[in-house]
Image (spheres, rainbow, N blue to C red):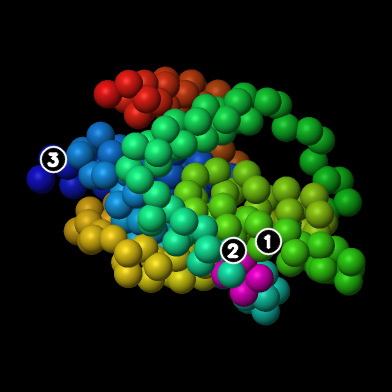
Amino acid sequence: MGIELVILFLVGCVGGFLNVMAGGGSLLTVPIMIFMGIPGPIANGTNRIAIIAQNIAAVSAFAKQGFANFKLSLSLALAAIPGAVLGAWVAANMPEQDFNTLLAIIMVLVMVVMSIKPGKKNTQAKPGYIPSKNQLIAGHLLMIGAGFWGGFIQIGVGFIMMPILHRVMGLDLVTTNSHKVFIALVYTIVALFVFASQLQLYWMHGIVLGVGMAAGGIFGARFQVQKGEKSIKWVLNIVLIGFIIKLLFF
């Protein structure tokens, strides 16, 4: 048990950093719990404990640096909640083997997305930009779908929310990340209640993982320029391939 908790803390640090920088941290945290013998749906629910801790730390770090528009963040988070509730309920009631197979497929798809070079940044997205009425409407509607994905699996939700906030709503990338962590915090709290009502979660594992993710989240919020990106992606991909083999064949 002691070794497991140490591993979870360390993996949480990396996962928290990745989640705040862009997304994908749960690609590590959920599979590592499955490797430890925790059933997939329960690992998926337990991961939400850590996500909450990470995002509390990240929201606080962004706010201290002057990146906080809680009115807009809360409005977008409320739009995401209905989708998150439905997604969490579906995930909590999914058979374990079906969940593991789906998780492996999702991991493959996310790896493909991560390997594609991003398109040009939205050059119109400037600090302090105020979205138009149409941009706000589109952003809120799309956030319902993002909330479903976040409630269902969480993995890769950052890759969904960032285009909505940056490309659709025209927000700069730092502001985008500040909204992203707040939105994820709010809908994850609601999703955790759904999981806890349906499954027996591993609270100690989730708390320890959360401490690590909070540390990683603070670091990611303070340092938005990720160093050594290529080497990190190589290591991440190697680990993910091992997870996929485990989920599909063992």
Q: Secondary structure at mark 3?
A: helix
**Marks 2 and 1, how far apart in space?**
8 Å
| Mark 2, residue position | 83
* Residue with the mark numbered 3: 3
Distance Cα–Cα, label 2 vs label 3: 36 Å
The region drawn magenta spans 77-81
Q: Residue at x 35, y 45 (%)?
A: 95
Q: Is residue 81 visible?
A: yes
Alpha carbon separation for disc pair 1 and 3: 38 Å
For label 3, count other residues whose C-alpha is less than 10 Å away and answer few (under 14), some (14-19) or many (20+).
few
Expressed as whole percent of the image width and height from the top left, the position of residue 203 reads 23, 61
In which quadrant will I find the N terminus? top left
Image-quadrant location for residue 171: bottom right
Element at badge 1? helix
- Name the residue type under label 3: Ile
| Secondary structure of residue under mark 2 | helix
Which residue does the numbered mark 1 point to in the structure image? 143
Q: Are marks 2 and 1 in contact (CB under 8 Å)?
A: yes
Q: Nearer the observer, disc 1 or disc 3? A: 1
